[in-house]
Amino acid sequence: MEFAIQAEGLKKRFGDHEVLAGVDLCVPPGTVLGLLGPNGAGKTTTVRTLATLLTPDGGRATVAGHDVVRSPKEVRRRIGLAGQYAAVDELLTGRENLVLIGRLMGLGRRGARERAAELLDGFGLEHAADRPSKTYSGGMRRRLDLAACLVASPEVLFLDEPTTGLDPASRITLWQQVREQVARGVTVLLTTQYLEEADYLADRITVFGSGRVIAEGTADELKRKVGEERVEVGVVGADDLGAAAAALGRAVSEAPVVDRETRTVAVRLADGIGGVARAAAELERSGVAVTDFAVRRPSLDEVFLQLTGASARTDRAEESGDE
C-alpha cells in the first residue's frame, strides 16, 4: 500500500457553502500529516469525510486501502478517531470505558480486559483505572480518549485538535504517546491550531485555505518559502547599533534592519554558515559589545500568517466550530 490515506479532488458542500473545493492528500504509511488552516478552512470536514462520518459530494478517497464511499465498514474497522472533545462515558471507570469498547469491537471478555490493562498502563492511567472518568482531569480524559481510539489497534488514526485546552505538560505527554504509535507503524492525520504541535509531530504539513490546499511540504520546506535564515544581534546600548549594522553589512553585502527599541540588528543570510562566520568575525573586529548573537529561522506562525492571511493568535483563541 503506497498511501495509507489518499484523496483526489475531494468536495463537500453544505447548502450554498462549498466547504471542500477539490482537496488532494497523500499520506504514506507510518507517517504524520498535519493539517493547518484558520477556522472554517475545511480541516474538520476533511477528517469527518475520510472517517466516513460525512459522504463527499465529489472526488474520491481511500483509507487503509479501502474506498470511503464504497467500503465504509472496511474503513471503520481500520481507523481510530479522536474528535475535538473527549468522548468518554463519565459514569464508567477508565477501565470500564476501554473494556466496553473492546467488547463492542469483538475482542471477547478476556481479550478486552487484557487490552484495557495494556492501554491503561501505557497511558499512565493505571492508578485511576477504577475511578469514574468524571473525576479525571482534562489531560487524563484526553489520554483515556486516545487510548479508546487504540483499543482495536487501528492502522490509521485521525486526531482532530487533540490537545485543545490542555496545559503544556499534558500536551507534551500526549505528543509522546502519538509518537509512540507512529513508531509502531500507525499513520496519523492531525488537525491542530497549535503551530508548534505540527512542527513537533508532523512529517509533512498541508495548509488549508477556503476549502483548498494552498501549500504543502515539510516544516522546513514551508519555512523556506517564507524567507531565509537571518542573523540577529543584540547590543548593549543604542550607540552600538550603527557599528553593528555596518559590521553585518560588510559581512553579507546587504542592508541590515535596525530596531532601536529592542536594540537589535538583523540581516538576511544568503549563504548559510559562511555568512554566520563572516558576521561573527566582522563584529569581533569592530569591537561592538554584543549581548546576543543568534541565527533565526522563520517560524510556522510566520508561514501560517503569510500563506493564509489569517491571524494565528486570533485563530487559536476562537472556539473551534464545524469547519
Image (cartoon, rainbow, N blue to C red):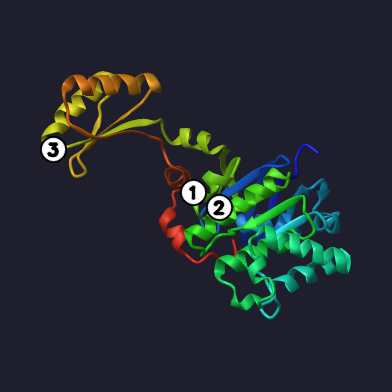
Residue 206 falls left or right of residue 287: right
CB contact under 8 Å: marks 1 and 2: no
Q: Quick check: marks 2 and 3 in contact, CB under 8 Å? A: no
Q: What type is the residue that disc 1 sits on?
A: Glu
- SS label for mark 3: helix
Question: Which residue occupies the extreme front position in the image?
Answer: 127
Alpha-carbon span between mark 2 and mark 3: 45 Å
Q: Residue at label 2?
A: 210
The x, y position of residue 57, in whole percent, is: 73, 56
Q: Is residue 224 above or below residue 206?
A: above
Mark 3: amino acid: Ala
Identify the residue at image location x=61%, y=40%. Answer: 203
- Circle on res. 196: 1
Looking at the image, residue 226 sits to the left or right of residue 90; the answer is: left
Q: Which marked residue is nearer to the observer: mark 1 or mark 2?
A: 1
- Who is closer to the viewer here, 212 or 321? 321
Q: Which residue is mark 3?
A: 238
Q: Nearer the viewer, mark 2 or mark 3?
A: 3
Residue 132 x, y percent position in the rendering: 66, 78
Location of the C terminus (image quadrant): bottom right
Residue 37 coordinates in the image, percent (x, y)? 53, 52
Mark 1 nearby-residue class (10 Å; few <14, some 14–19, many ≥20): few
Q: Secondary structure at mark 1?
A: helix
